[in-house]
Structure formats: structure tokens, C-alpha cells
Amino acid sequence: MLHSELTEKIEFEINEIETLIKSYSSLVELCKNQEPDLIYLSALATMLHSFYNGLENIFLSISKTIDKQIPQASNWHKILLYKMGEKTENKNPVLSEETIEKLEEYLSFRHFFRHSYSYHLSWNKLKPLVSELSELWLKIKEEIIKFKSNIKNVS
């Protein structure tokens, strides 16, 4: 895959995440002042899940294209996240250590969301993730764009 194909994939996912966050912004605002009911909580959980999936799509594209491999272990999602902080022969780190630490919480939530029933959702656990999402996204996007601007052609 050439530089342009990878950057196009990254840009597509960035736009999708931007649209996702914008689409849920009124619900996020509403929940700043009141505790969400199960329906709103489920919607916010879906947003968080989609957010992390979008990031993981970026990470997978980078890993497949530049590193020429994706982790195969049962905990491959976590390994993939950590690989985004590594400098290799072919790439600089995509994310800072601080960002990876924050994303571990979102990855953990993603796992919970996929393997649990929605009535187990807790606003106390979701609130910090929802509250920090916009600010975290700005930092992640900045790091990804910086990485993207330094990608060299890969074959």
C-alpha cells in the first residue's frame, strides 16, 4: 500500500470519528446535568465503543501497511494499542505513552461492552470516559496527524 492509500484510510477514519462525536454532542451535553437513563446510557456506550473501533481501524491500517503484520494473540487488541507507542525501523510512535494509558481505559470499556448486557452499564464508570472524550480526541487526532505527515512510501 502506498503512502497515499494509508493516509486516505487514516483521514477517512478521522472524519468518521469527528462525525461520531458531533452526532452525540447534544446527548453528551444533556448528560452533564442529569444522570442518563438506560436508553441514554446505552447510546453513550455505543458511542464509546464506536470511537475505539474507529481508532483501532487506524491502528490496524498502520500495522498492516507499515509493520506488515497484526498481532495474532488472544489479547491482540491490547498488543496493537501498545505497538502504536513503539518506534520501529519503519515508523515513529503513533501515540504518546500518556495517550496510550488513557486509551487503555477505552479499550477496557470496549471489551466490557462487547461481552456484557447493557443493563450492567454504570454511569459512574462511563461518566469519566464520556466527559474526557472530546479533549482526548483532540490530543489523539493531533498525534495521528503528526504521524501521518511523516509517513514515507511503503510497499
Image (cartoon, rainbow, N blue to C red):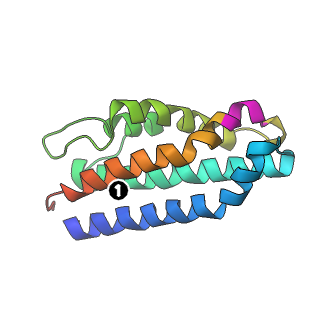
Magenta range: 121-127
Horizontally, is 103 left or right of 68 in the view?
Answer: right
Q: Nearer the viewer, residue 128 or 115?
A: 128
Q: Check the image and report above or below for 144 versus 111.
A: below
Q: Nearer the viewer, residue 139 or 50?
A: 139
Q: What residue is rendered at 64% in x and 53% in y?
A: 47
Q: From the top left corner, tell me how far across and down residue 139 is, in percent.
A: 41, 45
Q: From the top left corner, tell me how far across and down residue 146 is, in percent.
A: 26, 52
Q: Which image quadrant: the C terminus?
A: bottom left
Q: What residue is rendered at 31% in x and 36% in y?
A: 85
Is-magenta flag for residue 103?
A: no
Horizontally, is 28 left or right of 145 in the view?
Answer: right
Please tell me in which quadrant of the rendered image residue 72 appears: top left
Horizontally, is 142 left or right of 23 in the view?
Answer: left
Q: What residue is rendered at 41% in x and 36% in y?
A: 99
- Residue furthest to the front in view is 33
Report the residue marked by disc 1.
61
